[in-house]
Amino acid sequence: MKVFESVVTDIQLRSRVGTDAVWWMSLAETQFAPGGQGMLEAVTRSGTRLEIPVTFVVEGEDGVLWHVVEKPLAAGTDVTGRVES
C-alpha cells in the first residue's frame, strides 16, 4: 500500500441523482494512477477524522488526475492518501 500527503486543489460535481452524487477531486500531488482505487483521509477543524473512498481515478484531457468520490472535500483541505496495490 502506498501512503502519501497532499492537498485538495479542485472539486467538481459531475452528476447527481436524488441524494447520490459523484464528485471529481484533484490533488496537488498523488500516488494514484488512472483506474486506481483507495482512500483519502482528512481531519476536520473539530478533530473528526473523515475517510473518503476513491472509487476510480480518471485522467482528464488536460492531464489532471481526477479522484472520483461520493463525498467532497473543500479545496485547500490537507489529505492523506492510501492507494490499494
Image (cartoon, helix red, strand yellow):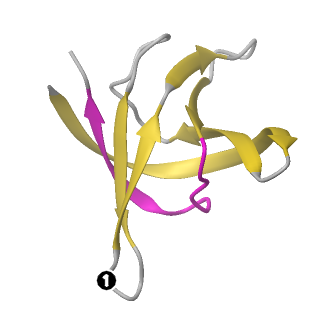
In the image, the segment drawn in magenta is 70-83
The image shows residue 49, relative to residue 21, as above or below, that is below
How many numbered marks have been drawn onto this rendered protein structure?
Answer: 1
Q: Nearer the viewer, residue 71 or 33?
A: 71
Vertical order, 30 against 9 (above or below): above
Q: Position of residue 7 (x, y in %)?
A: 45, 52
- Report the quarter where the N terminus lies: top left
Task: Residue 13: name its quadrant.
Answer: top right
Q: Residue at x 49, y 63 (%)?
A: 77
Quadrant in the picture for residue 58:
top right
In percent of width and height, residue 56 lies at 52, 21
**Position of residue 11 measured from the top left corner of the image (x, y, whole percent):** 69, 47
Is residue 79 part of the magenta span, yes or no? yes
Q: Is residue 60 above or below residue 51?
A: above
Graded by Cα atoms within 10 Å as few (under 14), some (14 to 19) or many (20 or more), the crowding at tag 1 reads: few
- Residue at 43 percent across and 40 percent down: it is 53
Q: Residue furthest left?
A: 1
Q: Quadrant of the C terminus?
A: top left
Looking at the rendering, which quadrant does residue 3 occupy? top left
Q: Nearer the viewer, residue 56 or 19?
A: 19
Up-down relation of residue 61 to residue 64 (above or below): above
